[in-house]
Amino acid sequence: MREGTGNNFMSLQFAAKSENEAFARVAVAAFISRLDPTMDELSDLKTVVSEAVTNSIIHGYDSDPSGVVTIKVGIEADVITLVVEDAGRGIEDLELAKQPLYTSKPELERSGMGFTIMENFMDEFEAVSEPGGGTSVRMKKRIESKKALYN
């Protein structure tokens, strides 16, 4: 997702503030709109952006607005690659964090479904994290153009 690769791409950085989560959703949705995704596909993508960004803000940075969340989106033919990264505290036990209903912040009444939702809504999902070194979530989804449904 860099210039010169032939891909269409974008990169976005913003402060780790919860009010920026909606901005991230809309920015990604606008960028991928040229693929003419179905409403379900668009909803799924906006949901995974929300989950990943919220995880970075709440878990990665402990809601510290001085942190920075980075989103990278690439389009290659009909496949979207979405990467959400933070340089926050990282995840000590990534396999445990991926378990449905697990949350490291039960006092905030979090559902613990973020990774599960991302994994189920996307075709490919990979999370990499190192304690003290931040977290990177990389996902891919193939878009079925609505135009193809009418041909």
Image: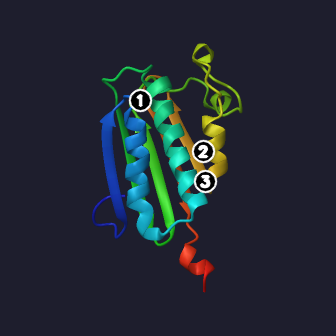
Marks 1 and 3 sit apart, C-alpha to C-alpha, by 23 Å
Mark 3 and mark 2 in contact? Answer it, CB < 8 Å. Answer: yes
Mark 1 and mark 3 in contact? Answer it, CB < 8 Å. Answer: no
**Residue bearing mark 1:** 18
Q: Amino acid at mark 2?
A: Met
**Residue bearing mark 2:** 118
Task: Specify the quadrant that holds the C terminus.
Answer: bottom right
Decide: few, some or many residues near mark 2? Use Cα within 10 Å; few <14, some 14-19, many ≥20.
Answer: many
- Quadrant for residue 91, please give it: top right
Q: Amino acid at mark 3?
A: Met
**x, y (%) of residue 148?**
58, 80
Indicate whether 5 appears above or below 30. below
Which residue is depicted at the point 67% across and 28% down?
96
Residue, far left: 3
Residue, far top: 107
- Residue 88 appears in the rendering: yes
Residue, far right: 100
**Residue bearing mark 3:** 122
